[in-house]
């Protein structure tokens, strides 16, 4: 399995394969959800151990991250800030109490490593979320990140082969 890790090439490929990926998403929706999940989770285990996220860090450089009150409390504690100061420096508050990290790239990224890794936010912990069930129901989001994450890109490309998809 030859993995692609160059973000420049991945982004070019993503543009070239846009229509193919739309057809692939439709193809996957015709498959058994459990079988697709098993294939995705297996491929994810193989591929994610071969890709060094700290060599990339693109998720931390490009994603908007939701933060819960508990997560903000933990991060504030790690940084030895009171919660008001943490919120003022690092969060943007939206409607209905929603909170987001207020900068892209993330404040906590330093040399492609998370400075609050042990207390990172759930969205960060879960990304790229290929280990989660219901892959087919999350295809829109997965394909939205296809050009952003080498793990997602490579899992999707290998999944095309494993499912017998023909473009």
Image: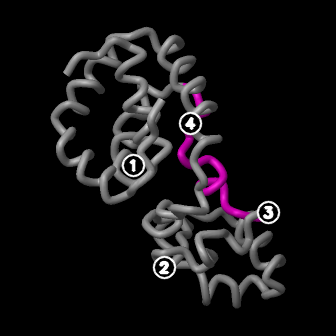
Q: Would you say residue 46 sits in the magenta stretch?
A: no
Q: Residue furthest front?
A: 2
Disc 2 target residue: 103
Q: Which mark is residue 47?
A: 4
Residue 92 percent across, percent down from the top left = 52, 78
Mark 2 Cα within 10 Å, few/some/many (few <14, many 20+)? Answer: some
- CA gap, disc 3 to disc 1? 24 Å
Query: Which comes sooner in the sequence, label 2 or label 1?
Result: 2
Residue 52 percent across, percent down from the top left = 60, 53
- CA gap, disc 3 to disc 4? 23 Å
Query: Which comes sooner in the sequence, label 3 or label 1?
Result: 3
Under tag 3, what secondary structure?
Answer: helix
Query: Which comes sooner in the sequence, label 2 or label 3?
Result: 2
Highlighted magenta segment, given as a residue range = 118-133
Query: Which comes sooner in the sequence, label 4 or label 2?
Result: 4
Q: Nearer the viewer, mark 2 or mark 1?
A: 1
**Relative to 108, is 147 on the left or the right?**
left
Query: Which comes sooner in the sequence, label 3 or label 4?
Result: 4
- CA gap, disc 2 to disc 1? 19 Å
Q: Which mark is residue 145?
A: 1
Q: Which mark is residue 118?
A: 3
């Amino acid at each position: 399995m030859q993995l692609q890790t160059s973000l420049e090439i991945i982004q070019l490929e993503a543009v070239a394969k846009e229509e193919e990926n739309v057809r692939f998403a439709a193809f996957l929706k015709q498959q058994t959800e459990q079988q697709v999940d098993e294939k995705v989770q297996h491929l994810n285990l193989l591929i994610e151990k071969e890709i060094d996220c700290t060599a990339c860090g693109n998720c931390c450089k490009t994603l908007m991250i939701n933060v819960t009150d508990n997560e903000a409390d933990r991060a504030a504690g790690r940084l030895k800030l009171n919660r008001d100061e943490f919120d003022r420096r690092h969060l943007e508050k939206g409607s209905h109490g929603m909170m987001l990290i207020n900068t892209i790239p993330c404040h906590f990224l330093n040399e492609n490593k998370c400075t609050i890794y042990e207390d990172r936010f759930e969205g960060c912990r879960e990304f790229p979320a290929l280990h989660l069930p219901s892959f087919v129901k999350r295809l829109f989001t997965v394909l939205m990140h296809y050009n952003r994450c080498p793990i997602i890109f490579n899992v999707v490309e290998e999944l095309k082969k494993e499912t017998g998809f023909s473009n």
